[in-house]
Image (cartoon, grey):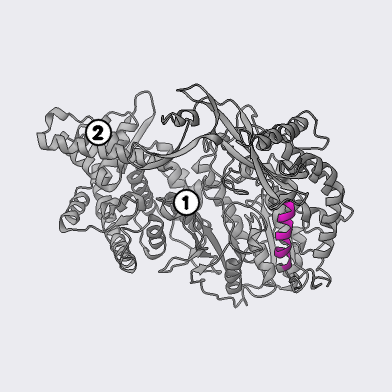
């Protein structure tokens, strides 16, 4: 029976491939041709605001998409969006020939979607790795020419690759090729003192302190004697050793694949392991690599004595890029990269290099022995046991997969597309020239793109010194939330400048940190955008979830999309401070901002309060015309921490104002969420509660007049947290009464305020200090609300005098404290 032919084999791609515009990609520098490209578009489609008839409503339907497509899986990138979903937004907001911009293009999903819909596309990113990947995602290729170039590459590198991975079959003695190797860290058993590879340890289930079973590794020598001695991976390490080799026999053995281990019970396998596998590794280690590879350290750019990431990923356990790879795979990667650079078809070099980068991390030591090509995405970390796959075999498999993707990337005409490695805060795009923006900006510190892309950029020999321009929170580089907010404000101001009046920008939002959401709202309003008002959440849901996404508290389950519109001439954008108010109106607005901020952040220094007021203004310079100190003192009072600067807290009179106004907002919001919870549980009777991310989506879209306190702050005032971390309604009248009483007394606010005093080491005013009975009630409240850290702190450092409590209250508060401690231990074990 004849084998089914692929599209390429049938010759469907023999037609000419569209030629890309001259200078559409400029490597790791800003594209000097970008402005001319946009201006040419404007001449073709002149824009006149006076006669412009554009009037498109906001996109209003959630999208369920899939990541299981050939195009999506062409390259690994962080937080990619399915291009098919983006196409729906582009079809809604634009017409063929319109200009679509993504100022944070990542892997190029927006640009690709725009091109496939017959639109013009601009893709911008500060990361050279991102623009390289985008360029190759959006460049159509001649599959036949590409296959010929890949065969040429194979001929060039085959001799060295064959030598790197050659071994022998222990069944027939014939030639074999290493498919993958497994390396394992060695630890010392504290009981028998034997040094054992973690790979060889027995795995058994054990109870944790929180009573939850977990899998632990135990010493195999002790286990044979009936003793369960756990091997702690936090103790001294004695280096990684080769423990397993999987090979493919080339001499006809069936099956071709087999494996052997360093301690194999089969004597012949053990001998072959020593004679051919270990001997090959020693031979490779003894030789210098004759090709270039990156010498870069994974270090702070300004000070290479400081490693990147210690503040956001303490588990980082290597310092140089080459430590990510075995010498065998490092050698192979360098060999192939050198071969790509010498290909006769210059046009195919970048496409094959794109394929090469797509498998780079998959053949690193970050892959585990359980996942052939899987690794922990979003960070760099070397596991105790790793599986290192044959580089050439991996790239051959990936190339075949990429052909399917390239076959699907088709354009009806020449792709009108420019990509530029530049700062989203200051582009070369003319004013009011873009028809639509779809983008996924960097939110806070969720993805450290600069560090994640560093390995690709180092191997591609691109610029690796651009990270001060990155819009991200990174304490190692001295960036905090204020820096992020200001840089985002600049980037969104640039979006506002280049977008035509009346047109839309869609922000893909995937951060459940409500503080960030509040900042995004404020930033977009300050810039001048009008937010779309909708009653239901808009999202892109792939349906494919990790275990953590399914069960974790406050994790991103899907990507929200928030739509903002640039107002038309004469249309009012927002009612925030503009700087044109009279003194009375201005003072009222500033006092309201201060009350809002100190309600959420009691015990804040004056400069932080000032920054918050300024951040809510369009023109910060107007602050100089008003007496900020006087306005602050009208609603707040101060106290000084030991040896520190003064900190500010709301006055009792201001708290009363906040309580009255905010309680009404919170009651209305809770009523909305309560109905949402009831409906969700009716639809799914097996569920105990509703996940926080579902509540967050409903809150973002359906609650119009939002309280200033974050959702996570006031949610415990109305609902109960289940053991699974979800949220439920009060189940009885008694439970409802407990919540109502807590709201009446403002327990949550007062607990937060009191804890701020404790944490900041300031003298607690007499009228703010709770008595022992109140402290006991607060600890009970924290236990019920899931505020376990706060309950523990109140018991240990809140000044509770146990001798002053009655016997029943004493027993209860100690039990509440123990529950808080156990739940914290459990949460720590689940991380």
Kindly tell me whether residue 687 is visible in this rendering: yes
**Residue identifier under label 1:** 617
Give whichever of 631, 710 is nearer the camera: 710
Which badge, 1 or 2, comes first in the chain's sequence?
A: 1
- Graded by Cα atoms within 10 Å as few (under 14), some (14 to 19) or many (20 or more), the crowding at tag 1 reads many
Give the answer, above or below, for where 120 lies relative to 384: below
Span highlighted in magenta in the image: 395-407
Q: Position of residue 237 (x, y in %)?
A: 56, 26
Is 383 in the magenta? Answer: no
Q: Secondary structure at mark 1?
A: loop
Give whichever of 416, 460 is nearer the camera: 460
Q: Position of residue 157 (x, y in %)?
A: 83, 46
Within the image, what quadrant is residue 288 found in?
Answer: top right
Kindly tell me whether residue 419 is visible in this rendering: no
The residue positioned farthest toward the right in the image shown? 344
Q: Position of residue 481 (x, y in %)?
A: 49, 43
Within the image, what quadrant is residue 409 found in?
Answer: bottom right
Give the number of marks: 2
**Residue identifier under label 2:** 795
Give the answer, above or below, for where 609 lies relative to 764: below
Is 404 in the magenta? Answer: yes
């Amino acid at each position: 029976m004849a084998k089914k032919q692929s599209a390429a084999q049938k010759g469907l791609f023999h037609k000419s491939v569209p030629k890309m515009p001259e200078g559409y990609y400029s490597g790791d520098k800003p594209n000097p041709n970008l402005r001319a490209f946009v201006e040419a578009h404007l001449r073709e489609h002149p824009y006149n605001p006076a006669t412009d008839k554009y009037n498109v409503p906001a996109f209003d339907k959630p999208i369920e998409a899939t990541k299981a497509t050939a195009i999506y899986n062409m390259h690994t990138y962080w937080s990619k969006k399915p291009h098919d979903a983006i196409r729906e937004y582009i079809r809604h907001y634009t017409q063929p020939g319109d200009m679509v911009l993504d100022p944070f293009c990542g892997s190029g999903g927006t640009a690709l979607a725009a091109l496939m819909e017959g639109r013009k596309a601009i893709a911008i990113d500060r990361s050279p790795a991102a623009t390289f990947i985008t360029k190759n995602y959006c460049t159509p290729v001649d599959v036949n020419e590409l296959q010929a170039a890949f065969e040429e590459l194979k001929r060039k590198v085959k001799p060295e690759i064959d030598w790197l991975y050659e071994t022998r079959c222990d069944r027939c003695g014939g030639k074999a090729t290493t498919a993958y190797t497994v390396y394992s860290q060695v630890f010392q058993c504290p009981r028998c003192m034997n040094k054992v590879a973690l790979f060889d340890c027995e795995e058994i289930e054990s109870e944790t302190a929180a009573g939850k079973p977990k899998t632990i590794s135990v010493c195999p020598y002790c286990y044979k004697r009936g003793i369960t001695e756990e091997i702690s991976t936090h103790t001294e390490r004695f280096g990684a050793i080769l423990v397993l080799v999987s090979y493919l026999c080339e001499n006809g053995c069936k099956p071709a694949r087999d494996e052997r281990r360093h301690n194999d019970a089969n004597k012949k396998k053990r001998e072959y392991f020593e004679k051919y596998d270990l001997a090959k590794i020693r031979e490779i280690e003894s030789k210098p690599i004759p090709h270039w590879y990156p010498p870069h350290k994974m270090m702070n750019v300004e000070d290479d004595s400081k490693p990147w990431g210690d503040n956001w990923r303490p588990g980082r356990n290597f310092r140089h890029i080459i430590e990510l790879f075995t010498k065998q795979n490092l050698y192979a990667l360098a060999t192939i990269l050198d071969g790509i650079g010498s290909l006769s078809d210059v046009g195919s070099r970048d496409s094959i290099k794109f394929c090469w980068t797509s498998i780079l991390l998959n053949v690193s030591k970050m892959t585990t022995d359980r996942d052939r090509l899987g690794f922990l995405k979003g960070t760099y970390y070397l596991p105790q046991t790793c599986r290192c796959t044959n580089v050439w075999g991996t790239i051959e498999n990936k190339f075949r997969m990429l052909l399917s993707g390239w076959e699907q990337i088709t354009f009806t005409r020449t792709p009108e597309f420019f990509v530029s490695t530049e700062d989203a805060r200051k582009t070369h795009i003319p004013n009011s020239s873009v028809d639509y923006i779809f983008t996924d900006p960097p939110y806070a510190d969720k993805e450290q793109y600069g560090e994640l892309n560093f390995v690709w950029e180092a191997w591609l020999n691109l610029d690796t010194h651009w990270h001060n321009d990155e819009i991200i929170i990174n304490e190692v580089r001295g960036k905090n939330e204020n820096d992020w907010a200001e840089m985002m404000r600049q980037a969104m101001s640039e979006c506002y400048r280049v977008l035509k009046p009346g047109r839309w920008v869609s922000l893909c939002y995937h951060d459940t940190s409500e503080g960030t959401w509040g900042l995004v709202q404020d930033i977009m309003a300050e810039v001048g955008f009008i937010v779309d008002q909708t009653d239901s959440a808009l999202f892109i849901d792939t349906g494919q979830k990790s275990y953590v996404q399914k069960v974790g508290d406050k994790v991103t389950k899907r990507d929200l999309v928030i739509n903002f519109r640039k107002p038309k001439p004469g249309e009012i954008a927002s009612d925030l401070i503009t700087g044109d108010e009279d003194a009375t109106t201005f003072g009222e607005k500033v006092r309201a901002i201060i009350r809002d901020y100190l309600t959420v952040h009691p015990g804040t220094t004056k400069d932080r309060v000032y920054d918050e007021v300024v951040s809510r203004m369009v023109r910060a310079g107007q602050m100089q015309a008003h007496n900020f100190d006087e306005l602050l003192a009208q609603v707040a009072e101060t106290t000084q921490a030991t040896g520190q600067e003064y900190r500010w807290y709301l006055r009792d009179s201001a708290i009363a104002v906040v309580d009255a106004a905010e309680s009404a907002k919170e009651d209305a919001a809770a009523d909305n969420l309560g109905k949402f919870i009831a409906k969700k549980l009716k639809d799914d009777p097996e569920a105990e509660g509703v996940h926080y991310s579902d509540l967050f989506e409903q809150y973002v879209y359906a609650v119009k007049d939002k309280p200033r306190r974050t959702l996570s702050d006031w949610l415990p005032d109305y609902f109960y947290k289940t053991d699974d971390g979800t949220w439920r309604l009060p189940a009885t009248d008694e439970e409802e009464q407990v919540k109502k009483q807590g709201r009446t007394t403002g327990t949550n606010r007062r607990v937060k305020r009191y804890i701020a005093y404790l944490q900041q080491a300031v003298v607690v005013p007499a009228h703010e200090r709770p008595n022992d009975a109140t402290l006991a009630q607060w600890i009970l409240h924290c236990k019920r609300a899931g505020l376990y850290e706060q309950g523990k702190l109140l018991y240990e450092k809140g000044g509770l005098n146990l001798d002053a409590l009655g016997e029943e209250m004493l027993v209860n508060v100690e039990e509440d404290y123990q529950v808080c401690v156990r739940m914290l231990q459990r949460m720590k074990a689940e991380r």
